[in-house]
Image (cartoon, rainbow, N blue to C red):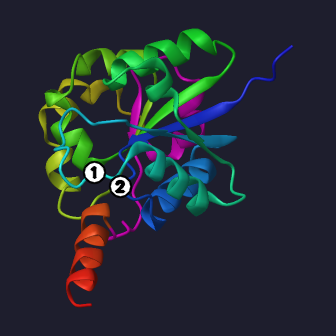
């Protein structure tokens, strides 16, 4: 019999993976009582430009190097399934691993832009969601369209450890000091350093 796990799912381009991803993952494991976090490396985010996007294999390899021996799994499932939309990937995962309890992890910036995602309402109905602060996005995200639409399904922070066991829709906003680092900032810094050589 397969052991049931409580698993956080963090999707993204990971272009590149950085300490902010680690910080969110480790905080999720602690605050949500998760067994592990899976990083779902996106072959190509439909809402992002291809320009400046490192090769998929490099992003996966770099992410694995950043993870080290932490309880974080770098997954290539979206490449394997040829899925491009989060809702499609999550539907496959919940059907393939019915014994696990999944939680979608995302930053406040994504909560704010969620109505641009394919079948975004369906995402709320598939698995519980944990939202993490992002500088300059948190306040706006909590009054945005998605937060308002699912306001009655938001659970209080003191019930965070129960999120993975809840029937969706269920979501939480975890207050914590946000890490200001961003992949865009890292890429800009590297480009500046390269141009100064």
Is residue 53 shown in magenta? no
Q: Is residue 38 left or right of residue 174?
A: right
Residue placed at 30% from the left, 36% from the top? 44
Q: 87 or 32: which is nearer to us?
A: 87
Element type at marker 1? loop
Q: Answer few, some or many: residues within 10 Å of disc 1's Cα (few below 14, many 20 plus, some between 14 and 19).
A: some
Q: Which residue is mark 2?
A: 15
Quarter of the picture holding the C terminus: bottom left
The answer to whether residue 134 shows anywhere in this view is yes
Front position among marks 2 and 1: 1
Label drawn at residue 9? none
Residue 184 placement (x, y as % from top left): 25, 63
Q: Which residue is mark 1?
A: 53
When the figure is inspected, residue 191 is found, relative to residue 63, above or below; the finding is below
Cα–Cα span, label 2 and label 1: 7 Å
Residue 26 placement (x, y as % from top left): 58, 56
Residue placed at 51% from the left, 58% from the top? 62
* Contact between labelled residues 1 and 2, with CB atoms less than 8 Å apart: yes
Q: Is residue 136 left or right of residue 15?
A: left
Residue extent of the magenta highlight: 156-181
Element type at marker 2? loop
């Amino acid at each position: 019999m397969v052991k049931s796990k409580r698993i956080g799912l963090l999707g993204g381009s990971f272009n590149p993976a950085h300490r902010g991803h680690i910080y969110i993952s480790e905080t999720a494991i602690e605050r949500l009582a998760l067994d592990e976090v899976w990083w779902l490396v996106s072959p190509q985010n439909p809402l992002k430009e291809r320009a400046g996007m490192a090769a998929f294999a490099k992003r996966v390899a770099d992410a694995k190097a950043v993870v080290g021996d932490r309880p974080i799994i770098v997954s290539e499932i979206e490449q394997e399934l040829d899925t491009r939309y989060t809702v499609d990937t999550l539907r496959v995962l919940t059907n393939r691993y019915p014994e696990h309890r999944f939680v979608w992890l995302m930053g406040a910036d994504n909560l704010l832009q969620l109505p641009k995602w394919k079948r975004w309402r369906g995402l709320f109905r598939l698995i519980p969601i944990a939202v993490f602060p992002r500088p300059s996005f948190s306040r706006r995200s909590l009054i945005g369209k998605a937060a308002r639409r699912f306001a009655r399904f938001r659970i209080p922070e003191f019930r965070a450890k129960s999120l993975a066991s809840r029937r969706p829709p269920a979501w939480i906003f975890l207050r914590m000091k946000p890490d200001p680092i961003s992949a865009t900032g890292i890429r800009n810094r590297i480009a500046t350093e390269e141009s100064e050589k």
